C-alpha cells in the first residue's frame, strides 16, 4: 500500500483455474485500489524469440502427411501421427517409446552449454555452462550445424556460441508482426505432444515430475488439457 509504483505480474497459468473469472475480477479491483501497473507474463517466451527471428514456418496437416523426415528438437515424440517418417529425435532424455525408424541424437541441457534465452521483456540474455554434458551429448546448435554441413546447406559455419550470439544481436527482433498462423503450426488433432498440459512445468518436452519425485506433491498432474 505504501509503494510508489506497485506492479502486479500475472502468469498464464492463472487462467487455467476453474475460478479464473473470480480471480480476474479481484485482480481488477486490486489494480484500481492501489493504482498498480499490470504485466502479463506470456507463455513460451523462447517461442516468441524464434518467431521474431523468422526461424519457424507454418505447417499444415497436409505438409505433415508428406514428410519423409521429422526432426524433433527438445520435445517429446508426438502421438497419433497418421504418417511414418524417419525420426531424428534430439533431446536430453531417450524417447518414451522405441523409434520404429530413426536416430536418437543426445543433446546437452541448458546447464551444460553456453547459450541465450529470451526473457519475458523480449530481451536476449546469456546463459553460462555449469557442468559437462554426459557421454556423447552435444549442444543443440552443434548438432544442427553438423547436419546442415553434411547436407551442404550454407550459413551453418559457426565455430562457437559467441558467433551465434553476435548474429542474433545484429538482427532486428522488433520487426513486423508475424502471421498468427505461425503460432499454431499444427492443426487440431494432427499431432498431440504429451507435454502440452496447462500449468504443467516441463523442460525439453518432459514434465519436471519425471525426474523430481517431490515435485509430484507440489505440482500434481493438472486435470485439464489444452487442445
Image: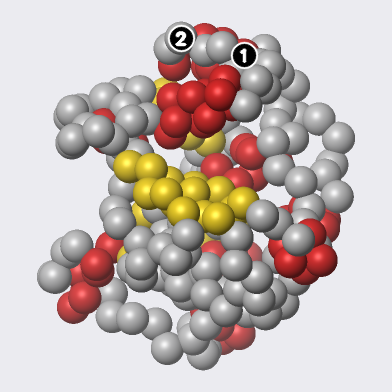
Residue pictured at 74% horizontal, 35% vertical: 54
Q: Position of residue 96 (x, y in %)?
A: 33, 68
The disc placed on residue 128 is none
Identify the residue position indicated by label 2 in the image: 159
Q: Quadrant of the N terminus?
A: bottom left
Q: Which residue is more in the foreground, 3 or 133?
A: 133
Residue 155 sits above or below residue 137 on the image: above
Residue 211 sits above or below residue 194 on the image: above
Q: Which residue is more in the foreground, 7 or 12?
A: 12
Residue pictured at 18% horizontal, 78% vertical: 217
- Closer mark to the observer between disc 1 and disc 2: 2
Is 221 left, or right, of 68 in this rendering? left
Q: Secondary structure at mark 2?
A: loop
Residue pictured at 46% horizontal, 54% vertical: 102
Residue 110 sits above or below residue 69 on the image: above
Q: Tell me how far mark 1 sits from mark 2, CA to CA.
A: 13 Å
Q: Is residue 124 visible?
A: no
Q: Which residue is more in the foreground, 76 or 12?
A: 76
Q: Position of residue 227 (x, y in %)?
A: 63, 79
Is 132 left, or right, of 73 in this rendering? left
> Of marks 1 and 2, which one's residue comes earlier in the chain?
2
Q: Is residue 179 visible?
A: yes
Residue pictured at 24% horizontal, 69% vertical: 209
Is 42 left, or right, of 63 in this rendering? left
Q: Position of residue 118 (x, y in %)?
A: 53, 36
Q: Position of residue 168 (x, y in %)?
A: 61, 19
Identify the residue position indicated by label 1 in the image: 167
Amino acid at each position: 500500500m505504501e509503494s510508489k509504483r506497485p506492479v502486479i505480474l500475472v502468469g498464464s497459468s492463472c487462467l487455467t483455474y476453474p475460478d479464473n473469472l473470480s480471480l480476474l475480477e479481484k485482480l481488477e479491483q486490486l489494480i484500481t485500489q492501489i493504482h498498480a501497473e499490470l504485466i502479463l507474463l506470456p507463455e513460451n517466451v523462447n517461442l516468441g524469440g524464434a518467431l521474431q527471428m523468422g526461424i519457424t514456418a507454418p505447417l499444415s496437416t497436409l505438409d505433415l502427411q508428406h514428410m519423409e523426415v521429422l526432426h524433433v528438437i527438445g520435445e517429446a515424440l508426438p502421438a497419433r501421427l497418421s504418417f511414418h517418417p524417419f525420426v531424428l529425435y534430439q533431446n536430453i532424455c531417450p524417447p518414451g517409446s522405441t523409434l520404429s525408424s530413426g536416430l536418437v541424437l543426445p543433446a546437452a541441457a541448458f546447464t551444460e552449454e553456453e547459450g541465450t534465452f529470451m526473457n519475458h521483456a523480449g530481451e536476449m540474455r546469456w546463459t553460462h555452462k555449469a557442468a559437462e554434458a554426459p557421454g556423447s551429448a552435444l549442444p543443440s546448435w552443434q548438432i544442427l550445424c553438423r547436419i546442415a554441413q553434411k547436407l551442404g546447406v550454407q550459413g551453418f559455419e559457426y565455430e562457437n556460441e559467441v558467433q551465434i550470439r553476435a548474429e542474433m544481436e545484429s538482427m532486428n527482433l522488433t520487426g513486423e508482426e508475424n502471421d498468427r498462423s505461425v503460432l499454431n503450426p499444427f492443426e487440431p488433432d494432427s499431432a498431440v505432444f504429451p507435454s502440452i498440459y496447462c500449468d504443467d512445468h516441463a523442460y525439453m518436452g518432459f514434465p519436471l515430475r519425471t525426474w523430481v519425485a517431490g515435485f509430484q506433491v507440489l505440482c500434481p498432474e493438472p486435470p485439464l488439457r489444452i487442445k
